[in-house]
Amino acid sequence: MDRRKFLKHTAIVSAGVAVQTAGCSSSMRAIIMEMPARGEWITVIYTDYKELEEIGGAIQIHVEDKNESIILMRSSEGRFHALSPICTHLGCEVKAVKTGFRCPCHGSAYGEEGQVVNGPAREDLASYQIAQKGRQISIRVM
């Protein structure tokens, strides 16, 4: 195969992978939430967000007081995880996909609980302590 055919073939395959990857993305909506006046916790009523109705759904919360972001993901019926969106490889922001999270910079993949599935990252995403009571999820953001 000559160089021109190789490059054309590679471009077609790359475009197909990009389309498939975009189709696998779950909906993740960014919201801005203020920290409460007391304590180290923020609270989310998960039924207020259609993104959290389905397993694999996620929202990204920006905590202005702390200048940090948190991804809240529903991993199963009644089970949620709060994770940092910062890839542990080089600090890029990960994106939610149906199987967990993927870093767009170097391809690291993480499972729905933030565990490394595929490198180059070697460490899991940082996680936040959560407490759930009914529809209310509290996330500790120290």
Image (spheres, grey):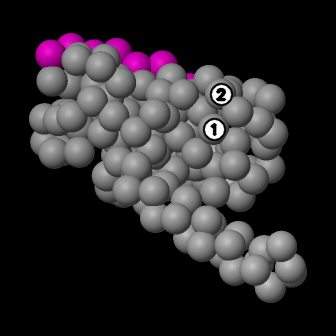
Query: Would residue 2 be counted in the magenta stretch?
Result: no
Q: Nearer the viewer, residue 116 or 136?
A: 116
Furthest residue to the bottom? 4
Q: Amino acid at mark 1?
A: Ala
Q: Nearer the viewer, residue 44 or 1?
A: 1
Q: Residues within 10 Å of mark 2 (few under 14, many from 20)?
A: some
On the question of residue 39 being in view, the answer is no
- Is residue 139 shown left or right of residue 136? right
Mark 2 vs 1, N-terminal side: 1
Q: Amino acid at mark 2?
A: Val
Boundaries of the magenta span = 126-134
Query: Would residue 133 be counted in the magenta stretch?
Result: yes
Q: Is the stretch drawn in magenta largely helix, strand or loop?
A: strand
Q: Mark 1 highlights which residue?
A: 109
On the question of residue 67 being in view, the answer is yes
Q: Are marks 2 and 1 in contact (CB under 8 Å)?
A: yes
For mark 1, give the secondary structure.
Answer: strand
The quarter of the picture where the C terminus appears is: top right
Q: Mark 2 highlights which residue?
A: 117
Query: Which residue occupies 64% across, 57% down?
Result: 104
Res 11 → quadrant: bottom right
